[in-house]
Amino acid sequence: MEQVIQAVRLQLYRDNLDGALELLGAAQAKHPDPRYETQIARIGSWRAHLASPGAYAAAYERYYRATKCRPGWTLLERQFRTLLGWRTRKIVRRTATHPEFRLLERELLPLAPRAVLDAGCGEGRVTLALAARHPALHVEGLEVTATNVAIARGLNRFPNATFSQGLIEEAGARFPAGAFDAAYAFAVLEHVADVDVVVRCLLGLVRAGGRIAFEVPMTELVATGALPDLEPRDGVAGHVRVFTAAELRERFGRYPGFVLERINGVWRAGRYPLTLAPVEFGSYFVAFTRP
């Protein structure tokens, strides 16, 4: 059993809840044990917010409101810097240097796009950077939480950027089919209840010949010793799955113009047990053409 538990913990540190549950399910089927059942129930409860769109939206709203709206001097300073436009200028300057942003521009500029969708925009950092650097381009930021939409709107200084609240899965009721020349979703697919539904919605919103891009975590880790147990903050797991290069090729490689890039990240050892080491750590950037 300990060998199975250690394998499960490795998947949890990779943020791969689906993989952890698969290991436990297989072990329970082969050697039934109430301890496996306990672990399955415990880890499954971390995914409770995926039960419905309302539960998903509410969980993320609680999280962002708690982390970004806590009263105090930090909040007051942030609001002051936002009011003066300092935060917006800093966000645009920094975001423009990020490798995933440069890759996104590489994919977008040959299209000479007029309208682009940032699906799951968070505070709108990429939306704002695109709008600032490309004034002829309209960028629509779609975000599930009211807290992040309010922050993004407060930061916005660009007439060609707009922000709205909503789920990607329901965006088809908000925007006409083919309304965008391109769409991207950075740090989104690892969160959602159903990847296929999100991808299908974006395919419907982008015109034929447009580009779709994703960025997802690259978290290939190896255990060098026993791993301690892991419990997510507030009992809710933000990331519920991981992707490998092979899985991304299998899922998206059939689309024309498919590209897959690895972006190396910075391994912060203090965030992980000493008995965990990176094999590949950072993110994957994927792009393809909408047929």
Image: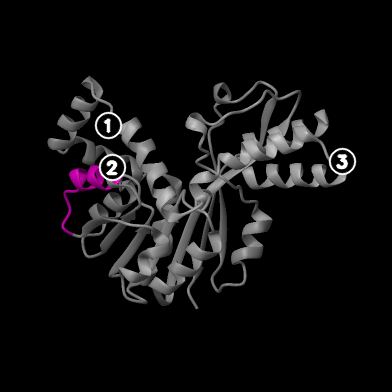
Q: Residues within 10 Å of mark 1 (few under 14, many from 20)?
A: some
* Foreground of the two, 271 or 71: 71
Q: Position of residue 175 (x, y in %)?
A: 31, 70
Q: Position of residue 118 (x, y in %)?
A: 35, 57
Mark 1 and mark 2: Cα distance apart in space: 8 Å
Q: Amino acid at mark 2?
A: Thr
What secondary structure predominates along the stretch shown in magenta?
A: helix
Position of 171 with respect to 254 (left or right) is: left
Position of 264 with respect to 137 (left or right) is: right
Regarding residue 132, the answer to whether it shows in the image is yes
Q: Secondary structure at mark 3?
A: loop
Q: Residues within 10 Å of mark 3 (few under 14, many from 20)?
A: few
Position of 280 with respect to 70 (left or right) is: right
Q: Amino acid at mark 1?
A: Cys
Is there a contact, CB below 8 Å, between mark 1 and mark 3? no
Looking at the image, residue 92 lies above or below residue 10: below
Q: Which residue is mark 2?
A: 147
Is there a contact, CB below 8 Å, between mark 1 and mark 2? yes
Name the N-terminal-most of marks 1 and 3.
3
Q: Which residues are the magenta region?
A: 148-159
Q: Which residue is mark 3?
A: 31
Mark whose residue sits in front, 3 or 2: 3
Q: Which mark is residue 69?
A: 1
Q: Residue at x 76, y 46 (%)?
A: 25
Q: Amino acid at mark 3?
A: His
Q: Quadrant of residue 272?
A: top right
